[in-house]
Image (spheres, coloured by chain):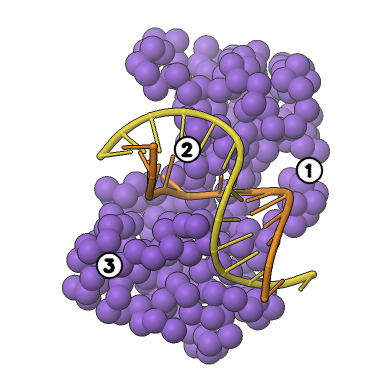
Chain colours: A purple, B orange, C yellow
DNA sequence: ACCTATGTTATCGC
DNA sequence: GGCGATAACATAGG
């Protein structure tokens, strides 16, 4: 789940639950979920500090502590957050993948949960510098049209690999890159250089719409508006926009789904 | 047993 | 140095 819309939903969830609460203790159930530094150092860093603010950049969620340090959270392919109260059942199987538990001063705990252990949490001094060090591109919902066009202009290969390149643009992953291309009627293998200015501007607009609509639907495939590809990611499925046939191809070791009727090849 | 799955990173060949 | 393909990491489900 965790592409830009999902992480935005996590951010809003965090903002209305754990934010403004003080961390009393950190339980590290899986050392591997601490991406940098030692679990002890992370515990020391968060204990007795309030979670003050949050920011999202691409698929990263940053949480500011009251001493101006930050937690950088990445969710890999299966991570999410859960805010659990003392009365909430803990042994329902869900809790099995809670890797980190932040015990808060309101008696609740914020769980960083992740079935597959890709991703994790680490302490960073500054999200900007962290992002710069990793050469992370601008957030897909914050980037201006001008910068989008400029960055895309420096690209050579297929449009889908450009859209999912976090150094070019942060936030789109396999699912939402497909979704944007589906909306724009562009085949995922189309070389960037074959897209004229109009098509590129269209991509920008469609990207914004897709992301905003997905967030409004809580990034839930069940709630997403009709006309989204997301619930129809299956070879042979009917295209919800034109009645064509959804096809699956492999690109860069990943599945790409597209409509063979309205996303014309090359 | 094999394939698939929302991510990132390293490596190889062109 | 860029780009595509591939494997690796980890875990579960079909």
Tell me the quarter of the picture where residue A62 sits: top right
Residue at numbered disc 3: A246
Q: From mark 1 to mark 3, how far is it between C-alphas?
A: 43 Å
Mark 3 vs mark 2, foreground winner is 3
Residue at numbered disc 2: A78
Q: Position of residue A118 (x, y in %)?
A: 57, 37
Q: Position of residue A8 (x, y in %)?
A: 51, 47
Q: Position of residue A59 (x, y in %)?
A: 57, 49
Q: Position of residue A31 (x, y in %)?
A: 65, 21
Which residue is drawn at the image coordinates 58% and 69% (left, top)? A162
Which residue is drawn at the image coordinates 47% and 75% (left, top)? A189
Tell which subunit mark 3 falls on: A
Give the SS element for disc 3.
Answer: strand
- Tell me, yes or no, if residue A56 can be seen here: no
Q: From mark 1 to mark 2, how far is it between C-alphas?
A: 25 Å
Give the SS element for disc 1.
Answer: loop
Mark 1 vs mark 2, foreground winner is 2
Q: Nearer the viewer, residue A156 or A171?
A: A156
Q: Is residue A7 above or below residue A141?
A: above
Q: Do marks 1 and 3 share a chain?
A: yes
Tell me the quarter of the picture where residue A29 sits: top right
Tell which subunit mark 2 falls on: A
Mark found first going from the N terminus, 3 or 2: 2
Residue at numbered disc 1: A126
Q: Is residue A177 found left or right of A146 in the rendered image?
A: left
Q: Is residue A257 above or below residue A259?
A: above
Mark found first going from the N terminus, 1 or 2: 2
């Amino acid at each position: 789940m965790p592409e830009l819309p999902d992480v935005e939903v996590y951010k809003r969830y965090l903002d209305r639950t754990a934010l403004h609460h003080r961390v009393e203790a950190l339980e590290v159930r899986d050392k591997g979920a601490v991406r940098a530094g030692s679990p002890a150092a992370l515990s020391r860093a968060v204990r007795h500090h309030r979670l003050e603010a949050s920011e999202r950049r691409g698929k990263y969620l940053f949480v500011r502590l009251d001493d101006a340090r930050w937690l950088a959270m990445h969710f890999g392919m299966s991570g999410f957050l859960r805010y659990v109260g003392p009365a909430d059942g803990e042994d329902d199987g869900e809790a099995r993948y809670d890797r980190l538990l932040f015990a808060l001063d309101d008696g609740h705990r914020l769980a960083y949960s992740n079935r597959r252990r890709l991703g994790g949490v680490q302490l960073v001094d500054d999200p900007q510098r962290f992002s710069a060090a990793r050469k992370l591109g601008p957030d897909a919902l914050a980037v201006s049209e001008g910068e989008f066009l400029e960055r895309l202009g420096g690209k050579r290969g297929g449009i889908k690999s450009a859209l999912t390149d976090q150094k070019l643009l942060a936030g789109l992953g396999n699912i939402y890159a497909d979704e944007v291309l589906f909306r724009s009627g562009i085949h995922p293998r189309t070389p960037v250089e074959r897209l004229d200015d109009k098509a590129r501007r269209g991509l920008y607009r469609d990207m914004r719409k897709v992301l905003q609509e997905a967030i409004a639907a809580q990034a839930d495939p069940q709630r997403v508006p009709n006309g989204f590809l997301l619930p129809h990611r299956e070879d042979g499925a009917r295209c919800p926009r034109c009645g064509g046939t959804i096809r699956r191809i492999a690109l860069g070791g990943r599945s790409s789904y597209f409509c063979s009727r309205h996303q014309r090849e090359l």
